[in-house]
Image (spheres, helix red, strand yellow):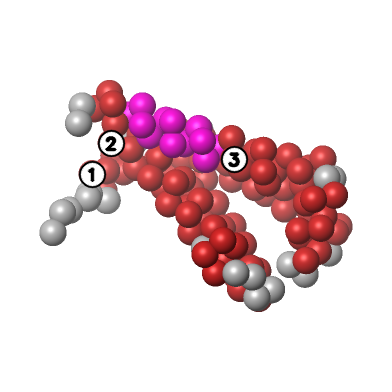
Amino acid sequence: MSGSLVLWIGRVLTGAFALFMVGASIAPKLAGAQVARDAMVKLGWDERFIPLIGLIELSCLVLHLYPRTSILGSVLMTGLLGGSIAAQLRADQPLFSHVLFGVYLGLAMWGGLWLRDPDLRTFLPFRAI
């Protein structure tokens, strides 16, 4: 696969991840949407923390999207997704649709970054068995 095609696939995957995070998670939290409040309360979060969590998500996403801080943003977002997985487990949510959704998002995030960052591909090479 050519370098240009790999780069563009990575950009598309990163863009899809970013649009999903903004549209489905960050914006509803920052806008105070009822759907965000209902979901967070169901997981055991106090409503007063919802905007703060949205700001943390936004900060991690901005760091992830900026090339000089993309690795830092990805590591921080991975921690955030891990917390999401833990909260889903604690609330006894369904495994494949809720608990593992953070894993799916993490794979999309890191996959997009891996495809668009040649230094990361050198550091974490893909090795076929």
Select label 3 or label 1 by which is in front.
3
For the record, the magenta segment spans: 7-18
Task: Give the residue at mark 1.
Answer: 122
N-term mark: 3 or 2: 3
Task: Give the residue at mark 2.
Answer: 118
| Front residue (pair 102, 72) | 102
Judged from the image, the secondary structure of the residue bearing numbered disc 3 is helix
Work out which quarter of the rendered image holds the C terminus and state it.
bottom left
At label 2, which amino acid type do we have?
A: Pro
Mark carried by residue 55 = none
At label 3, which amino acid type do we have?
A: Phe
Work out which quarter of the rendered image holds the N terminus and state it.
top left
Please indicate whether residue 125 sits to the left or right of residue 54 in the image: left
Q: Tell me the residue at 38%/34% (across/down).
A: 10
Q: Residues within 10 Å of mark 2 (few under 14, many from 20)?
A: some
Magenta highlight: main SS: helix
- Marks 1 and 3: in contact by CB < 8 Å? no
- Marks 2 and 1: in contact by CB < 8 Å? yes
Residue that lies at the very extreme toward the left in this rendered image:
129
Q: Tell me the residue at 56%/61% (across/down).
A: 97
| CA separation in Å, label 3 and label 1 | 28 Å
Judged from the image, the secondary structure of the residue bearing numbered disc 2 is helix
Q: Position of residue 121 (x, y in %)?
A: 27, 43
Task: Give the residue at mark 3.
Answer: 20
Please indicate whether residue 42 sits to the left or right of residue 112 in the image: right
> In the rendered structure, does residue 32 fall within the stretch colored magenta?
no
Q: Position of residue 120 (x, y in %)?
A: 31, 43
